[in-house]
Amino acid sequence: MFKSVFTVSKMDCPSEESFIRMKLEGLSAIKSLVFDIENRKLTVFHSEENPEIEQRLKELNLGAEHKETIPVQQDEFFENTSEQSKLLWTVLLINFAFFIIEITTGLLSGSMGLVADSLDMLADAAVYGLSLWAVGTAVTRKKKVATLSGYFQLALAGIGLFEVIRRFIGVEEMPDFRIMIGVSFLALIANSVCLYLLQKSKSREAHMKASMIFTSNDVIINAGVIVAGILVLLINSKYPDLIIGAIIFLIVTKGAFRILKLGK
C-alpha cells in the first residue's frame, strides 16, 4: 500500500473535492482519498504506483503538485463511509430545504437576491448529491448526472440573469427588505449548523476534515443579501438587491461550468 501526497493550490471549497473525486473515479488502484481543504492538500492511498493519478489531477487545472509517495500500512487509510454518507445526507437536506424556502420567499417578496441565493443553495445540494451518488455507481452514470446537473444550474442562472437585466431596465416594485433580511439571517443560521456538524465529524473522520470550511462562500453570500436588504431600506432603491442577485447568479454560473467539465 502507498500514500501519495499532493498540494492543490486552487482547492478551496467542497466543489473542488467533488471534482477531484469524480476525476479519479475508475482507477482501481485507489483505495481512499483524504482531503485537507484548509491546507489545500490531498492524500491518496493506493495499492500500486500509478502515474495516471497525477496525470488526471493535472488535467483539472487546479494547480496539483505531487509532493511524495511512501509505503504505508493498510489500516492507515481506513475510512468510515457510512458516517460520511449520513453527514452528507444531512447537509444536502438542509441546503435543499433552504432552496425551497428562499425561492418561495424570494418570488413573493420580489427579491432577486433571495432567488439567486436559493439557486446557490441548490447548487450546493447538487454537489453533495453527486458525492452521495458516487458511492457504488458506475463512472459513466455519474458523469451523466453531473452533466444534467450542470445544464440545469446553467439554465436557472441564465433565466435569473435575464430577469435581473429586465428589472434593471424596467419599472419594478421595491423588494421587501424585511423578508430579505429575515430569510437570509435564517439561511446564515442553517449554514452555521452545517458547519458545526462538519466540524463535529472532524474528530472522528479524517476524510470529513475536507468539508470543514464548505460554508464559507455561502456565509459571504448570506451576508451580502442581508447588507443589500439594509441598503434597500436606507436608500429606498431596488438596485442593491439586483446587484447582489447578479453577483450570486454569476457565482452559480461559474459553478455550473465547472460541474459540466466533469461530464466530459
Image (cartoon, rainbow, N blue to C red):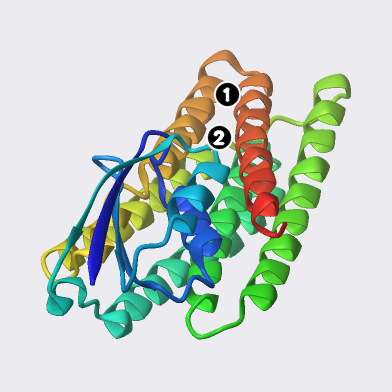
**Residue occupying the point 47% across, 30% down:** 224
Residue 116 in view of the camera: yes
Residue 143 horizontal/vertical position (percent): 67, 67
Which quarter of the picture shows residue 217?
A: top left
The amino acid type found where label 2 is placed reads Phe
Residue 159 horizontal/vertical position (percent): 82, 44
- Residue nearest the viewer, comparing 66 with 37: 66
Q: Would you call the spot at circle 1 few (<14 residues within 10 Å), some (14-19), or many (20 or more)? A: many
The amino acid type found where label 1 is placed reads Val
Q: Would you call the spot at circle 2 few (<14 residues within 10 Å), some (14-19), or many (20 or more)? A: many
Residue 108 in view of the camera: no
- Residue nearest the viewer, comparing 83 with 122: 83
Q: Which residue is mark 1?
A: 232
Q: Is residue 76 left or right of residue 223?
A: left
Q: Is residue 241 above or below residue 196?
A: above
**Residue occupying the point 57% across, 23% down:** 232
Q: Which residue is mark 2?
A: 177
- Residue nearest the viewer, comparing 49 with 45: 49
Q: CA distance from mark 1 to mark 2?
A: 6 Å
Quadrant where the C terminus lies?
bottom right
Residue 152 horizontal/vertical position (percent): 76, 58
Return the residue found at the far top.
235
**Residue occupying the point 42% across, 76% down:** 89
Q: Secondary structure at mark 2?
A: helix
Which quarter of the picture shows residue 2?
A: bottom left
Question: Do the residues under discs 1 and 2 have CB atoms within 8 angstroms?
Answer: yes
Q: Secondary structure at mark 1?
A: helix
Q: Is residue 189 left or right of residue 159?
A: left
Number of numbered discs present?
2
Q: Is residue 183 above or below residue 237?
A: below
